[in-house]
Every structure is written in C-alpha cells, then in structure tokens.
Amino acid sequence: MKDFAALIEQLDSTTKTNQKVAALAAYFVEASDLDRLWTVAILSHRRPPRPVNTTLLRQYAAELAGIPLWLFEESYHIVGDLAEAIALIVPQDELLSKKQLWEILVELIDLKPKTEEEKKAYVQGIWMQLDYYSRYVFTKLLTGSFRIGISQKLMTKALSQVTQVPEDELAYRLMGHWSPDSITFDELVFGRNEQAYVSKPYPFYLAYALETDLEELGDVSEWCIEHKWDGIRGQVIHRRGELFIWTRGEELVTDRYPEIASLGTALPGGTVIDGEIMAFVGGQIGLFNELQTRIGRKTVSGNILKTVPVIFKAYDLLEHSGKDLRGEDYLTRRALLEDLVKSLRHPSLQLSERVEPASWDEVRAERDLAREKRSEGLMLKRKSATYKVGRKKGDWWKWKTSPLTIDAVLTYAMRGHGRRTNLFTDYTFALWQENELGDRELVTFAKAYSGLTDREFAQVDAIIKRTTLERFGPVRSVEPTLVFELAFEGVAFSKRHKSGVAVRFPRILRWRQDKTISEANTLEDLKALIPKGTGADEE
Amino acid sequence: MAQRDLLTFNSKGIYCPQAQVYLDPWKPVHRAIITHGHSDHARFGHRHYLTHHSNVPILRHRLGDIQVQGVAWGEVFRINGVNFSLHPAGHILGSSQVRVEYQGEVWVFTGDYKDEDDGVCTPYVPIRCHTMITECTFGIPAFKWKPQQQVFGEINSWWQQNQAEGKTSVLFGYTLGKAQRILRYLDPSIGRIYTHGAVENMTEVLRPQVKLPPTLMVTRETLTADIRGSMVVAPPSAHGSPWMRRFVPFETGTCSGWMAFRGARARRSTDRGYVLSDHCDWLGLLRSIRESGASRVICTHGYTDIFSKYLRELGYDASVENTDYEGEKEDLNSASAAEST
C-alpha cells in the first residue's frame, strides 16, 4: 500500500506529464504482478464496489478522532474532500501495516457483505495502521471517488514502456470486460483470450477543439463535416450472436437502451459501430437534458420508453464482417457504414449525416445551424484519416458553437474549498421574473464557481462579506448588487428546478461592473433561448 | 456584564479603556503595544509604539523613523494603574503575548503564536489568565503539524535530489519569520544559499539576534551558472514572476500551514508543499488555552465560529470578535503582508 500511496503522491506532486509517466513506469517495474494488475484496474476505473457509505465513514472518523460529528463535518467542508479530511483528522498508530495494495483491495471486496460492526472495526483499524498519504489513498478507494491526475492514456503509455507492448495494442487489451480477480497480469497484457474479445470495444478516437482558422486546415476538399451530437458516445458491438452497447466511459449499458439493443438480430455478425446515444422525442433529436432521464436508469419502464425513446446516431464503422477497419480511411469506412445503415432501415439506428463542403464558408454556415439541428457544433474529419486511438490532433477536430450568454445577479455565495476556504467563490445566480402582483423579483436558476481571476474573487469576496444578509452553514445570502455575464452550452425546461429551466455547463464569463442589477436579464430572456418544441408544454 | 471589560474591541483595534492603550491597532492611534513585526499587526501611523526589544529593529526597518520603546520579557510597565507585560509567543523572533492586569483580573492577548519551539525565537510560555484573546488561524482538527526536524529533513533531501539532477531549488516563505526559520535549518554543506532581495534585507536586520548560515543575494549580476544546484529562498509573491526565469531549470517548494491541503498545493502549482507554520495547530491551540487556565476565551482570526463553538462545548465562555488580523494568509500571492519593506 505504501508503494502505491507513494506513487499517487508523486503523481500528485507534479503537473508535468513526462514525470507522471516516468513515476508510473518506475512503479510498474518494482511492483508485484498482483499489485500491477490491481493498479491497472484502478487506473482504468475498475474499482471494488463501495462497501461502506460515506455517512458511516464520517461517524467512524469522528469517533476515532474523539471529536463531535458536527466538528468533523465542518472540517470536512473546509478541506473539501472526504478522504483527505479523514486522512488529516484521524490519529495514527505507532506500528504501521505492511499490507500490499492488492491485499487491501481484496479485503474491501470481501468487506461488502459483512455486518456494520465488522466494517467499522476493519475500517478504523486500517486507518490507524496507515500513514497520512496511504490513509488518504485507502479512503479514496473506499469511497470509490478515486480521481488522480493521470489519464488512462498516460497509464497505458507507462505500461507500454515497461512491457514493450505497443500503446494502441495495450489500449485495446485494457478495454471492455475484465476483472482483476479473474485474470493475471500476464494474461491481461500479453495473453490472447479469444473469449474475452467477443465483447471488447475498440478504444475511442477523440478530437481536440479547433483552435486555428478553418483555412489553416488546408484544402476544403480533403474534409468532411458532421454535426457534433450532444448525447453519450458509444459503440454498438455485434459478435457471435451477442450484442453489446458500451459507452465512452467503458460502461456496459446494453440493458438500458433496449431500442438500440433490438438491433441485435438485424446486425450482421462481426460489426462494431461508433456513434452517439441520443434522445429522440417526437420525431426529432432531443436535448441532453431529456437523455439524462435515461442515463441512470437500470430498469427501463414502458412509460419512459414512450416519453424519451433513444436512437443510435452512427458516426463510423470500426469492424465489418469481423474485420478491423480502423486502418482504412474515413471515406471507405463511411461508405460501408452508410450501406449498412440504409440496408437495415432500423428505426433506432440513424446516420450522422456527412457533408462534403465545397468551401470553408459552407462549413461556417453549417455551424450556424447547429442549435437548430440540436447539435453542439461540428466535427471536421479528414477524408483520408484512419481511426486512431484516443485523443489525437490533426485529422479530427471539434468545432463547437459559441456559448449562450446571459447577465445574472449574484444572490447566494458559498465558501470555496481548500486554500479558498475563507473565500466565497461558489455562487448562485438569479434572473428577474414578474410575480402575480406585477412586481419584479429575482429567481435563482444556476450555480457557477469558475471564470474569475484570483483578484476578482478576492474583490467579490470582500463585497459578499460586506453585504451578507443571512448565514446558512457555509452559505450566505447576499444583498443583490453584483451582475455577472454567464456562459452556458444549452438551456432546457426542467421540472426539477425552481426556475423551471436548467442550463448546461454554466460558468462565469465576466463580471459586469458596468451594469446595475436592474439591467440584468429576465427569466423570459433565458426561456427564449430554449429550442422550440422541447417540452415547453410540460407545466 | 456588570464590570467593564479590561480589553474591548473597537474600530481601531483592541483597546484598554482604563489605560487608553491599543494592542496591535489597525488604525492610527496615540499609543500602541505591538506584539510582532508582521504588517497586519505592526501598522503605520501610530504616535508611540511599545514592543519587545527584539522587534525594535524590525519595526524601524519596516515603518521607518517611528517613536518606539523596547521592553524585556516579563518587564512590567504600569499605565494608569494597569500592569502590562510582554511574554514570548513563539511565532517569530520577538513575537509577544501581552499580559494585562488590573485590580486582580488578568487578560492575555496572544497575538500570533505557536507552542512548538522552533529554535529561532524564544519559545512560547503559557501565561495564566482569566480571559484569553487568542487567534485560531488553524483552529480545526484537520491541522496537525509534524515536528519541524522531520520537515527540514525532507527539505534538505529534496534540495540534494534537485542538485543531483542539476536543478536549482526555490523555496517560498514569508520574508519575516518563515524565511529565517528556513535559513536556520538548511544544510549549508549541500550547497550555496541564495536569497531574494526582500528576504536578504530582512535577514540582515535579524542576523545580530539569530545564528544563520551565510547567504548570497540574487542580483542582476548573479550568474545563472553559479546558482544552479543552489537553494534560493524567496517570498511567495516571487512565484511565477519573471525574476524566477534565471533559475531554469528549477523545482519549487512552499512552506506554509496551508500546504496541509492538497487543493492548496495544487492551486499554488508548487512542486512541493511543506507543511510548516508559525501558528499553533489544532491541538496546540487547545493545549495553550487549557494551560492558560482561562475560563473566558475570545477568538480573533481564523476559523473563529467553529473553534469558539467547540470551546463552548468544552465548557469555556467563548466568543468571537472581528479584527483586521490575517493570520497566515491563504492567498500567499496577495499583496501586502510580508512584502512591504
């Protein structure tokens, strides 16, 4: 455990990619095969299921530290991260545990069915026997919220350095369905287990955002465009009579989208389609907001199938008649895909339309249609491009539409976390609305906590502290005086929000010191930005 | 309250009405008792300053030609029937607690303090009192300091490792206090120690009072090749400034209590965060309050709401007063504090 914790600490203490890869590679060289295997599992988001909920963890920690629960909670708010708060607050034994990472992970898996007393004894015992950083890492594993600054791509790179297996090959091997308790490190990295390959998706090819002028991409005749659909990226796989739907987050979601799964019998064997899972309501592309009602649902009722049906918007064909097509060029793959989709005529499988623009201006004009077509913008794909592994520059670019903006009034503020714990940096914003009496009042509609410079945060913080009306724990209501321009990616009607609308990815664009609160926008202004015909009548 | 409080809080500072004296006032006053030289406690514009002998050169360095009187630890001075005396606070060189006694009632204002003996300043001593006015910069149980010996061991081996890789080590700490504490424990056998001008100037002021290794100030004439592999001690504001360019390739480290937080380390984008503070940690605060024997506690700056609530649960008569003191600043880049020389 100590070695793994030391690795995480190293990864944590540098922002330089090369150093991270070097640290990881050095760890892979030293670690036992079992620790290597479990490390790959954790870094590719395969974690043991959470054996204890966080409410209990807080109680265990407060008890162990001999402090009241409220004090632990307050401290946790300030630290901002439960595992870190626990690591900082609970005491440590003289004698530390020498358990390896894999031993602890296996214990965590075994812990799940045990009684609460057994869980408490185990967790408190381990906490005391680990040093600060190991305790932090252990608790991260325990809460299942393990995010460290290393992507699967970097992990694959380090592993490739150590094993000499090419990166793209490794990326493929690490995809899909495998579990560290039923495979060895050698089998995973070097082995050829045909059975495991049946369900295995290909690594996704991802695009970077376009940062240059279109003209710098060269001759427009080398490019195709598609819309950038705002759903969940996925792969539909049909091999040996079985159908699998994978998301980009490597989650197997076949059962959640029966409309798409019904493709099974129709698709020829040895087919892998890359595309986007999207809501399709009333005969048109739905908003992400609508798709969200399907995402978390493991059992799908007939009712939800009727109100929010989904489709698979196909981008690309990665495997055809059992043959890996990724080495072919885009046009070749698309021709096969288009034939396939057209011949199937399946209601849940649609093509992502491909345009061969005649000029860059035509591309610009198409991007202007994005909101109307319910897309996030465009994808630019080079006709001669092979299908690559991971995020690569050069052949695919995403070119999103400019965000929507609105001027809103700050009404609530919350303390930030960590170093910013004494600064109010998380804000709630409101827009004007006319009430029954004809008076204007402010209605909250969004939260945002990024987009200001440190200096601006300090200034805004000072104003918040001066204009506080009420305190609710870490939250304060403030006298409305400040106006901010907020940017967001989309807006939709929502029953879950008091304002009746939900905005996507809101963030602060700038502080409008030139505006008074009466000049802020109204809720009606925001609603006017909602695409026509999307659940406006749901009230 | 029937009896008037011996020390009160007003818009200018902590005030003793009986003696008509202010403690660490933040607005100009006639007579000020100053606990230590940090700029949120020792401000411009007072008519008469009174402080510990050690602070006199620091105050003169920072505030120029002021009227300042130095006193010794424990030396009692009487103003209008009130007995005042200064006692070591262990925060930085010269930092003092102020003991105030009138008609048998004793109040202590801690200023900033730590209960760990850092070997640079006179160690903190608990002073018995009825009412204690305490800071609580790190007054939540998430803060527990490691012994400084361990931290400096880590710092010196970090320096050695950087040196072996042909890199310069740049360590950030407050100009007054932290910088000298760092200098005191750097191992000069590893290599040369350079300083930022602000650190060098302050260190010169303190050299007569503290044993410190020789330092070289980084100037325009300093050659990059000479610095390589050395240690550079600089104020936090130097981080990310063009001044740093001459040290490439370098690694950075920050010494602050806030470095206990992972988020603070990340946001500061420092390669290493060393948890080293001149304030009490959680247990240090509780221990100090207990040892003072005070039944009433007034919290001035830091996590005052949380800390005072916990003290009340422990049976203290604890409350909060707002002041302009900043403690160890979280935003190490923000202006003032240690940099004004």
Image (spheres, coloured by chain):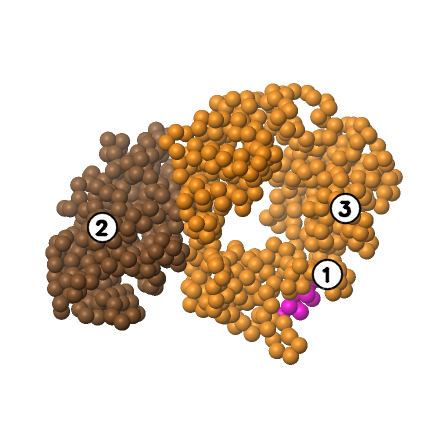
Chain colours: A orange, B brown
Task: Name the image quarter holding the N terminus of chain B.
Answer: bottom left
Magenta-colored span = A522-531
Q: Position of residue A451 (x, y in %)?
A: 52, 56
Whether the magenta-drawn stretch holds residue A523 is answered as yes
Q: Nearer the viewer, mark 3 or mark 1?
A: 3
> Residue at coordinates 16% horizontally, 58% vertically from top-left?
B85
Q: Nearer the viewer, residue A392 or A196?
A: A196
Say if residue A247 shows up in the picture: yes
Whether B48 is drawn above or below A349: the answer is below
> Which residue position holds label 3?
A300
> Which residue position holds label 2?
B126
Q: How many marks?
A: 3
Q: Secondary structure at mark 2?
A: loop
> Residue at coordinates 43% horizontally, 49% vertically from top-left?
A68
> Which residue position holds label 1?
A531
Mark 1 falls within which chain? A
Whole-angstrom CA distance, mark 2 to mark 3, is 67 Å
Whole-angstrom CA distance, mark 3 to mark 1, is 27 Å
Whether the magenta-drawn stretch holds residue A175 is answered as no
Quadrant in which residue A221 is drawn: top right
Point out which mark residue A127 bears: none
Callout 2: few (<14), some (14-19), or many (20+) C-alpha neighbours within 10 Å?
many
Precedes in sequence: disc 3 or disc 1: 3
Task: Name the image quarter holding the C terminus of chain B.
Answer: bottom left
> Relative to B79, is B162 on the left or the right?
right
Callout 3: few (<14), some (14-19), or many (20+) C-alpha neighbours within 10 Å?
some
Q: Position of residue B159 (x, y in %)?
A: 32, 34
